[in-house]
Structure formats: structure tokens, C-alpha cells
């Protein structure tokens, strides 16, 4: 990647996240490719290969996170992705009620699934990006090895007659192929149509 493109992406990433998230190291690092003449290819014996394989296994075992670390990471990301979804036009209005009512329920669900469900399924998980516009997706928790979702957290806009607009928070589970809506709660907006998700002043 060109040096100027890398720097531009680094700056754009910093601006887009308001400096709350540091850009990935791959954007910050400048990697020079060595000339092919200067690259020497190492030769390995069977003993060296066996030693390298056992070293890799040790590293993988050290890298695996404890359940508490996985939960802490997921909970932090869940809150960040939620507020990213809201943008400041919606977030400024509903943030207090969201933190009081909805976020603790989200945390309870995530904690339950990581602690109770299949360890292998929740050992390598990440949280996806939210959708903008009028889409429901807040984030999905997916297994990085299979690429399949395990939990989907959504928010639906509801225009209730004579009441106005509500945001209905719910999640879906892989147990029933994401068919049923499991309610987390609703937050009232007002009688006016809410702005699109991820809208900023």
C-alpha cells in the first residue's frame, strides 16, 4: 500500500472514530519489502520443524483468553457499537435510558451465552459493525473460525398509533436459526420520525 494512502487512511480512521479507537497497527506500520536478492530461504531439518510446531502450539495456548477477558471485551465492544449505531442525533436523546434499561440486559445475555454455552463456539468471537440508514442491525456476535453468527442484536423502529415512535431492542439466537425475537425493551422517541441511524449533527 502506498505510503500516502496508508497515512490518509490512518488520519481518516482517527477522525471517523473521534480518536476513541486507535487505528489498526497495519495502517500505522510502514512495511518495506526487501529485494528478492537479499532474501535467503532458511533450510529446516525435521528436528527444527518439530521444535517450531511445538512453539506455535505454546503461543496459541498463551493467546487464548479467559472467559472473563472475552466477556469484558465483548461488553466494551457492544456498548461502543451501540452508540456508533445511534449516532449523536439519536444517541444524545436516548443514551441515559439505554444505559439504564437496555445495556444491562444486553450484558446479561452476552455473559450468559459465554458462560453457559459451548466453549468452542464462544471462544473465538468478534462483534460486527452496525448498519446505518433504517436497518435494524446493531451488531452481530460471530465465530471468527466459522464466520457464522451466534447472536444478533437489533433495534426496530415502531410507529405505534396515537403514541409515536419507539425503538424496540431485541436479539436473535442461533438456537432457533435466528427466527424468534427475544425482547430487551423499548425506548420512546417522540411523535416525529426519528433520523437515520448513524446520523451526526
Image (cartoon, grey):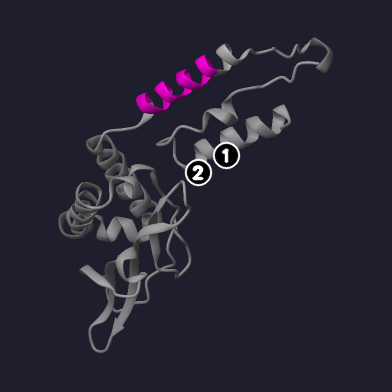
- Residue 154 is covered by the magenta coloring: no
Front-lying residue, 130 or 199: 130
- The reply to whether callout 2 and callout 1 are in contact (CB within 8 Å) is yes
Q: Quadrant of the N terminus?
A: top right
Compared with 44, 12 (above or below) is below
Locate residue 21 relative to residue 11 in the image: left or right: left
Q: Residues within 10 Å of mark 2 (few under 14, many from 20)?
A: few
Look at the numbered disc 2 and give the secondary structure of its residue: helix
Q: Quadrant of residue 73?
A: top left
Residue 97 image offset from top left, x and y in percent = 19, 59
Task: Name the residue at 50% across, 43% down.
Answer: 16
Find residue 12 and name its label: 1
**Can see residue 191?**
yes
Please provide the residue range marked out in magenta: 50-62
Front-lying residue, 108 or 56: 56
Locate residue 24 relative to residue 143 in the image: left or right: right
**Can see residue 201?**
no
Task: Name the residue at 48% across, 67% down.
Answer: 133
Compared with 82, 16 (above or below) is above
Find residue 16 and name its label: 2
Determine the main secondary structure of the stretch shown in magenta: helix
Q: CA distance from mark 2 to mark 1?
A: 6 Å
Residue 36 image offset from top left, x and y in percent = 82, 17
Q: Quadrant of residue 136?
A: bottom left
- Residue 60 is covered by the magenta coloring: yes
Compared with 43, 67 (above or below) is below
Residue 121 image offset from top left, x and y in percent = 34, 50
Q: Residues within 10 Å of mark 1 (few under 14, many from 20)?
A: few
Find residue 201 and name its label: none
Look at the numbered disc 1 and give the secondary structure of its residue: helix
Amino acid at each position: 500500500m502506498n505510503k500516502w494512502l496508508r497515512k490518509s487512511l490512518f488520519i481518516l480512521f482517527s477522525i471517523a472514530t473521534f480518536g476513541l479507537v486507535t487505528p489498526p497497527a497495519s495502517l500505522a506500520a510502514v512495511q518495506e519489502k526487501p529485494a528478492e536478492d537479499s532474501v535467503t530461504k532458511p533450510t529446516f531439518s525435521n528436528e527444527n520443524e518439530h521444535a517450531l510446531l511445538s512453539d506455535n502450539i505454546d503461543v496459541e495456548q498463551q493467546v487464548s483468553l479467559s472467559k472473563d477477558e472475552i466477556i469484558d471485551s465483548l461488553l466494551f465492544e457492544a456498548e461502543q457499537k451501540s452508540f456508533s449505531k445511534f449516532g449523536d442525533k439519536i444517541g444524545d436523546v436516548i443514551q441515559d435510558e439505554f444505559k439504564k434499561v437496555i445495556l444491562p440486559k444486553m450484558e446479561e445475555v452476552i455473559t450468559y451465552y459465554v458462560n453457559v454455552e459451548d466453549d468452542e463456539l464462544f471462544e473465538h468471537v468478534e462483534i460486527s459493525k452496525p448498519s446505518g440508514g433504517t436497518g435494524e442491525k446493531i451488531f452481530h456476535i460471530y465465530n471468527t473460525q466459522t464466520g457464522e453468527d451466534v447472536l444478533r442484536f437489533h433495534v426496530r423502529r415502531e410507529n405505534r398509533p396515537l403514541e409515536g415512535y419507539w425503538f424496540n431492542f431485541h436479539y436473535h439466537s442461533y438456537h432457533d436459526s435466528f427466527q424468534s425475537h427475544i425482547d430487551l425493551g423499548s425506548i420512546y422517541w417522540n411523535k416525529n420520525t426519528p433520523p437515520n441511524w448513524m446520523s451526526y449533527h
